[in-house]
Image (cartoon, helix red, strand yellow):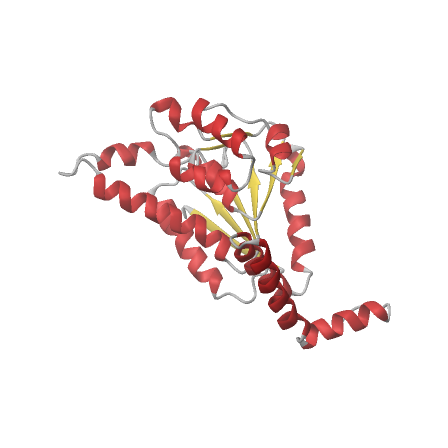
Amino acid sequence: MEILQRRDTGGVTRLHMNAPERLNALSDEMLAALQSQIDALMEDRDSRVVILSGAGKAFCAGHDLKQMQAGRQAEDGGAAYFADLFNRCGAVMQGLQRLPQPVIAQVHGIATAAGCQLVASCDMALAAEGTRFGVNGVNIGLFCSTPMVALSRNIPRKKAFEMLTTGRFLSCAEAEAAGLINRTVAPETLEDACDELAATVAAKLSAAVRIGKSAFYDQLQMPLDQAYAFTGEVMVENMLWRDTDEGIAAFLEKRSPDWA
């Protein structure tokens, strides 16, 4: 049975973490499977949107603690393994944002530690009512320093710091208010809601969404004046496309665009 299942339908790629007995933990095997799909999606021009979900009763419970403990058996106490593990995990998280396709997290049950990091690293997230979000490593003596990177770039810093230092979980309502997720839906409608959001995005001009996603993250790292200069250049490039010309003309003429 594949640990990460992929299904492509109408420009939407579904990646389904399939290790329910381990709460879809980010094991070495899961990280490798996610990285493999990220690499493939980078070059996939047919895929326009990605939905990431998890099997069983949880979205993702973070790192595989049993594997981490096994890593301690090395002569260096696990230092090399841990460094490699966190580098691989960081590469997956950054890879999700570097993908040309928008990535939607379909979250249910719990998203804890690196699982919460996974939600924060996706471009959008919908959650089923009752889902809980936490960076609770501090409860077992491990501060969630790497999950903190994505979390603190999603929600206000005082809220993030409270979560990190207390291990307290956020409810769906709190996660939505803080900006960690886009919205909460009934559990029975979660998949349909994600499909609807994905279909809406997939229907847009794919090239425009791709250039827009890249520019979105790039400009966030810039001072205000540089961000305006950079995004102005991006818009000039976008405006010169044949399909953008067609899209504007179609809007003005009140017809559907004939995009190439």
**Residue 106 visible in this rendered orientation of the protein:** yes
State the residue in front, 80 or 198: 80
Residue at x 62%, y 72% (from the top left corner): 237
Quarter occupied by the C terminus: bottom right
The reply, left or right, for residue 255 in relation to residue 173 is right
Count of marks overlaid on the render: 0
Residue 205: horizontal and vertical position, in percent? Answer: 67, 65
The reply, left or right, for residue 97 in relation to residue 129 is left
**Residue 255 visible in this rendered orientation of the protein:** no
Q: Residue furthest left?
A: 75
Residue 193: horizontal and vertical position, in percent? Answer: 67, 43
Residue at x 44%, y 56% (from the top left corner): 37
Residue 182 occupies which quadrant of the picture?
top right
Residue 181 occupies which quadrant of the picture?
top right
The reply, left or right, for residue 199 in relation to residue 88 is right
Residue at x 40%, y 56% (from the top left corner): 36
The reply, left or right, for residue 191 in relation to residue 256 is left
Residue 30, placed above or below residue 134: below
Residue 207, placed above or below residue 180: below
Residue 258: horizontal and vertical position, in percent? Answer: 75, 73
State the residue in front, 106 or 136: 136
Residue at x 56%, y 60% (from the top left corner): 226
Q: Residue furthest front?
A: 225
Residue 123: horizontal and vertical position, in percent? Answer: 56, 49
Q: Residue furthest right?
A: 254
State the residue in front, 165 or 4: 165
